[in-house]
């Protein structure tokens, strides 16, 4: 604990800048990078998607990341509390607290299905450890994934285990278990990913991967790809759903937000690109359809584990580390709601976490059962199953809109002086950031939305 703690004395702080960076990178790096980015790039035609994605990450996502961290640190409360407090201090409408509300509710919704996917990674730890990936063919890997989706016991068990671990860590407080989990395990995942890239490059179709990911086919750029890439850039950086604002509220004044945000965004993007480089060589070598959707990593990586020496072992470690990365992200999705409810009620953090986590688990059951051929799966919203519909709502609507309003608020409704004071940046960098957040972010996000609604 360090620094002045205004309102609630129970509100903890990161023990060091390093602890904060690990937690923030832990939040950003997760299933979004390794599971989602490759299949979305595959669906978006490869390079076209990657190019728009990179532009969104650095020109819009990173400035919004800076904005969200500053709002959290200035408010020192949950996203809802912080937004209300800052709006009041700046003499603005309390309606701005809706940004906090949308964040807390959105985090709740995302975690409900994130946990289901997290459960898949646990299931694959077991598949790999018990030798079920040994010598698996492309068809076999596809069939294994489909059979998981239809196995209600495994789906529910995975979801329960994932939420259980997340609740357990969050109940203990951010400063405790989390720090230890990230300090060794995240670098281990990074090294293993590099190993996978090398293995895939040597055994798969690396040339085609490079041209697929990095030689954009401009005819593939359209409004759906742009919307998807924008949503994914926010998702991957954990933006606009309260996670980053809450982590910002645990920040002490001495941490420089600008450089931290650039480091977080670079690490996050690096992991996503590595995941793409590890997966696509196998996808192309085995004739898997790049645009086949959310099962892409589960249909491709097992083939590599099935062939390499000690593949059962490497596969087990890989999926276990992926589960860890997913849990450090899940923690940041649970934290905003928990911190808000703790502000409102007089119960211990442990009790609040169990109730909130239990409610998220319950909602997630619908997503878990929506993936196979069971009754719930035939219930569609706009042609999407329940999990995909929640994903669409949060990824493509709530997050970009949240980002838009954060940019507008910070750029136009909070005084320049307050921001300069909060960021303590060199004047020239401040100007760059201020221009991006006032003009570039709102215009770009607004443009994509306008095109969707009226184009
Ligand atoms: N960024 C995480 C991932 O890539 C997921 C995540 C954590 C998230 N917190 C978030 C996504 C807040 C959106 C908003 O897996």
Image: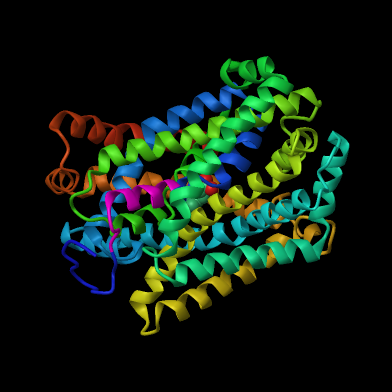
Residue numbers of the magenta segment? 13-25
Q: Is residue 397 visible?
A: no
**Splitting the image into 4 quarters, where does residue 204 fall?**
top right
At 80% from the left and 47% from the top, the residue drawn is 145
Rendered-image quadrant of the N terminus: bottom left
Q: Is residue 21 magenta?
A: yes
Q: Position of residue 331 (x, y in %)?
A: 48, 60
Q: Position of residue 199 (x, y in %)?
A: 67, 27
At 38% from the left and 35% from the top, the residue drawn is 60
313 displayed left or right of 273: right
323 displayed left or right of 415: right
Q: Position of residue 270 (x, y in %)?
A: 48, 32
30 displayed left or right of 100: right
Q: Residue furthest front?
A: 310
Q: Is residue 211 above or below residue 109?
A: above
At 27% from the left and 55% from the top, the residue drawn is 251
Q: Main secondary structure of the magenta part?
A: helix
Q: Is residue 48 visible?
A: yes
Q: Is residue 132 above or below residue 116?
A: above
């Amino acid at each position: 604990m360090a620094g002045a703690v205004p309102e609630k004395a129970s509100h903890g702080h990161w023990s060091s800048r390093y602890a904060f960076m690990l937690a923030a990178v832990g939040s950003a790096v997760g299933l979004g990078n390794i599971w989602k980015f490759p299949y979305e790039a595959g669906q978006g035609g490869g390079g076209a998607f990657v190019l728009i994605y990179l532009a969104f990450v650095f020109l819009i996502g990173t400035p919004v990341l800076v904005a969200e961290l500053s709002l959290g640190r200035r408010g020192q409360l949950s996203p809802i509390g912080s937004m209300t407090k800052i709006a009041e201090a700046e003499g603005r409408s309390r309606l701005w607290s809706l940004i906090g509300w949308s964040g807390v509710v959105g985090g709740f919704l995302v975690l409900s299905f994130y946990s289901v996917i997290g459960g898949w990674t646990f299931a694959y730890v077991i598949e790999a450890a018990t030798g079920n990936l040994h010598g698996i063919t492309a068809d076999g890997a596809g069939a294994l994934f489909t059979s998981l989706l239809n196995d209600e016991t495994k789906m529910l068990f995975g979801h329960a285990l994932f939420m259980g671990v997340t609740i357990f860590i969050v109940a203990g407080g951010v400063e405790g278990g989390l720090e230890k989990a990230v300090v060794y395990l995240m670098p281990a995942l990074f090294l293993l990913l590099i190993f996978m890239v090398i293995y895939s490059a040597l055994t798969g179709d690396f040339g085609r991967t490079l041209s697929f990911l990095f030689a954009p086919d401009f005819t593939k750029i359209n409004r759906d790809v742009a919307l998807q890439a924008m949503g994914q850039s926010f998702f991957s950086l954990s933006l606009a759903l309260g996670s980053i604002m809450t982590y910002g509220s645990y920040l002490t004044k001495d941490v420089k937000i600008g450089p931290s945000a650039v480091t977080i965004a670079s690490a996050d993007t690096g992991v996503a690109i590595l995941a793409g480089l590890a997966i696509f060589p196998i996808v192309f070598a085995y004739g898997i359809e790049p645009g086949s959707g959310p099962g892409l990593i589960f249909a491709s990586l097992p083939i590599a584990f099935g062939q390499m020496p000690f593949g059962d072992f490497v596969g087990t470690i890989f999926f276990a580390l992926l589960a860890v990365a997913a849990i450090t992200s899940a923690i940041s999705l649970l934290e905003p709601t928990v911190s808000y409810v703790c502000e409102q009620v007089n119960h211990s953090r442990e009790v609040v976490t169990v109730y909130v986590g239990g409610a998220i688990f319950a909602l997630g059951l619908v997503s878990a059962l929506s993936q196979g051929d069971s009754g719930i799966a035939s219930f569609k919203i706009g042609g999407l199953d329940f999990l995909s519909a929640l994903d669409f709502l949060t990824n493509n609507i709530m997050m970009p809109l949240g980002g838009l309003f954060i940019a507008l608020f910070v750029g136009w409704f909070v005084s320049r002086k307050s921001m300069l004071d909060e960021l303590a940046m060199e004047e020239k960098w401040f100007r760059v950031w201020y221009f991006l957040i006032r003009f570039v972010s709102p215009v770009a996000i607004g443009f994509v939305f306008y095109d969707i609604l009226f184009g």
